[in-house]
Amino acid sequence: MSQADELASLRTDAASAIEAASSRDVLREVEVRFLGRKSRLNEILKGLRDLPDADKRVVGPEGNRLRRDLEAHVERKRTELERADEEKLLSTDRLDLTMPGRRPARGAPNPLVSVRKRIEDAFIAIGYQIAEGPEAETDWNNFEALNMPPGHPARSLMDTYYLDGPRGPESAVLRTHTSPVQIRVMESRTPPIYIVCPGRTYRRDDYNATHSPVFHQVEGLAVDEGLTFRDLRGAIELFVEAAFGPGRRARLVPSFYPFTEPSAELQVTCPLCDGDGCSQCASGWLGIGGAGMVDPNVFANVGIDAERYTGFAFGMSIERPTMDRYGVDDIRLLFDGDLRFLEQFRGVPVR
């Protein structure tokens, strides 16, 4: 039998086998048998170089035509079998629209998210805006613009992680507070400015039940004409109530921060003794953050006229009020992402 006759025989046999395939698996076997690397058609095409020129001109085109026709035939049959399988599935697995649906399981927000949202909502309600910024910051925004030039002792309290930035090694840092967001806003906007700046921050610290090198802050800033310490006091009372819940008292104790003058430490009553004094707090009060009037040097660094405008700033981490309100005794639980921990707070209101 000549190879041309053999190709004609292969066409007939292959077409019959393809049509007879009863499933996609059987069709795959047929495809391998007639079109695979070890198929007779492939052997004939590989042997073209050994044929006389006259035979090449006949066998070559016919072999390639046969391959294209069989590939198209296989694809049509595969589509036909897939459609048949789908119809069979639809006929045996109909959807009963009268059955009640499966309610998807609801997740539970991390308690940190809940407390942060309560603080944001409280300040949005009185006209503040939410401001955010990058977690990798320039040394200028994180330290120098906030009145902490290189060598300032206050930097030692914010030991952080330095990065290689566009200005060379250690020209960028993982921000130690969200105050750089305040710098960015003051550089880009004209007062009046009323913002709260929530976000993740970083400082070198041990990772244990009460400390973490990663934590979250919410800071506030107001810049306007005629703002005084009395306005700061009002914002602090709103801040503490949103973070810790109603009933917690707050006070401002004289302190020092490079970026505010005058400065004060923000303290709240101990949740165990309500300010009477106990073994956990000694004095009845717990320091939670800082506050004060914006230092005129900071205004000068961002191009705001300190003769016309005054401002105040305040802030704290939100891990402490979160642990207080939810009764969490290990800060690591807030970061580990353990679903067993988070599921406890599904539908649980903030106390």
Image: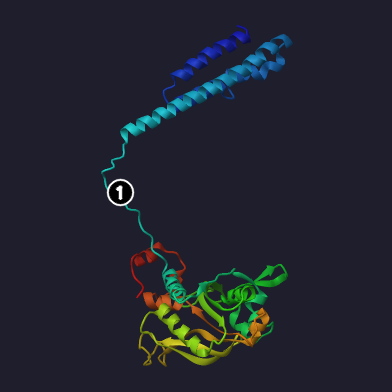
Estimate how packed mark 1 is, as few (under 14), some (14 to 19) or many (20 or more) residues with alpha carbons within 10 Å: few
Is the residue 199 above or below the residue 147 in the image?
above
Q: How is the image coloured?
A: rainbow
x and y percent of residue 238 in the render?
Answer: 43, 81
Quarter of image, res 113: bottom left
Q: Identify the element where label 1 is drawn.
A: loop
x and y percent of residue 291 in the render?
Answer: 53, 85
- Horizontal side, residue 8 vs residue 245: left or right: right
Camera-side residue of 249 and 301? 301
Is the residue 349 above or below the residue 280 in the image?
above
User: At 54% across and 23% down in the image, what residue appears?
Assistant: 72
User: At 54% across and 79% down in the image, what residue appears?
Assistant: 221
Camera-side residue of 35 and 132? 132
Quarter of image, res 243: bottom left
Amino acid at pointer 1: Gly
- Horizontal side, residue 35 vs residue 347: left or right: right
Q: Is residue 121 visible?
A: yes
Q: Is residue 147 visible?
A: no
Please state, as top left, top right, bottom left or bottom right, where the C terminus lies in the image: bottom left
x and y percent of residue 187 in the render?
Answer: 64, 75
Residue assigned mark 1: 101
Q: How many marks?
A: 1
Q: Specify the farthest residue to the left.
A: 98
Is the residue 173 above or below the residue 268 in the image?
above
- Horizontal side, residue 350 vs residue 171: left or right: left
Please state, as top left, top right, bottom left or bottom right, where the N terminus lies in the image: top right
Is the residue 130 above or below the residue 40 in the image?
below
Camera-side residue of 49 and 221? 221
